Image (cartoon, grey):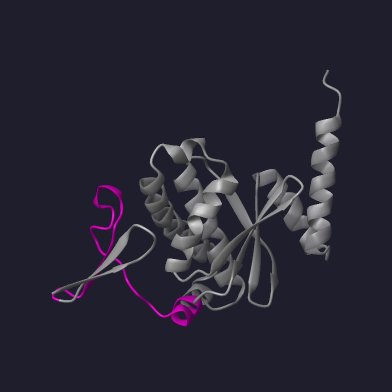
Amino acid sequence: MHHDKPAGPTHPVTFDLSRGEVHLDLPSGEDHAGSLVVPGDALAALAQAAGVAAAVDFGRALGRRLGARVSMKLDAQVREATIDAVAAALAGELAMAGLGTLVVERWGRALVLVLEGGSLGQGAAADALRAAALEGVLSRATGREVQAAALARDGLRLRVLVASAATLGRARAWLDEGVSWGDVIARLHGASRAASEEPSA
């Protein structure tokens, strides 16, 4: 017996009760092994026990699956879209996966993605998983390798910075020094503006 319910604006999730399987609509049968529906707090506990590195690997793999759905939906148009436009298109997929609602913030030239709420519990490993999921979903959807890292948590709201590896490294160093996330963004914006204003040789 099959029960189909919409998992997003256009793509279904299929519950095959006769086999005890759940399947997502992914390109080229990528969900051949099936998917799982698990409690968010149980997944957060597993991520905490496994450690941040394992949580990041899992989050990136999860994000790439969601990104495949977006890429399939937008087809070639995704190659021409800005990261902001693609991020907006991802909101439904992230909400469907229980990762929360997505808002895009622009701070000068810095791109910050905000996840609010969601079914996944809190903690350093859970937040690393969320950030890695955003990294994976953007990378797969756009066809360009994107890097992201948790910037700050404010209650149910997690801010994730999307930037180059070098920029993320500077941001992490400042955060470790106790610099507020707002000041980190201001410093990154100032450095970017100074670099753009340097005269060419």
Q: Is residue 171 above or below residue 155?
A: above
| Tally of marks | 0
| 190 falls in the magenta region | no
Please provide the residue range marked out in magenta: 18-45
Q: Give the x, y percent position of residue 42.
A: 44, 81
Viewer-side residue, 77 vs 50: 77
- Quadrant in which the C terminus appears: top right
Q: In x, y percent, where is residue 95? A: 47, 67
- Point out the residue furthest to the front here: 9
Q: Is residue 15 left or right of residue 75?
A: left
Q: Is residue 196 visible?
A: yes
Position of 2 compared to 97: left or right?
left
Q: Residue furthest top?
A: 201
Q: Position of residue 195 (x, y in %)?
A: 82, 34
Where does the N terminus fall, quadrant-wise?
Answer: bottom left
62 lies above or below 15: above
Q: Residue at x 71, y 50 (%)?
A: 169
Residue 136 appears in the rendering: no
Q: Quarter of the image holding residue 185?
A: bottom right
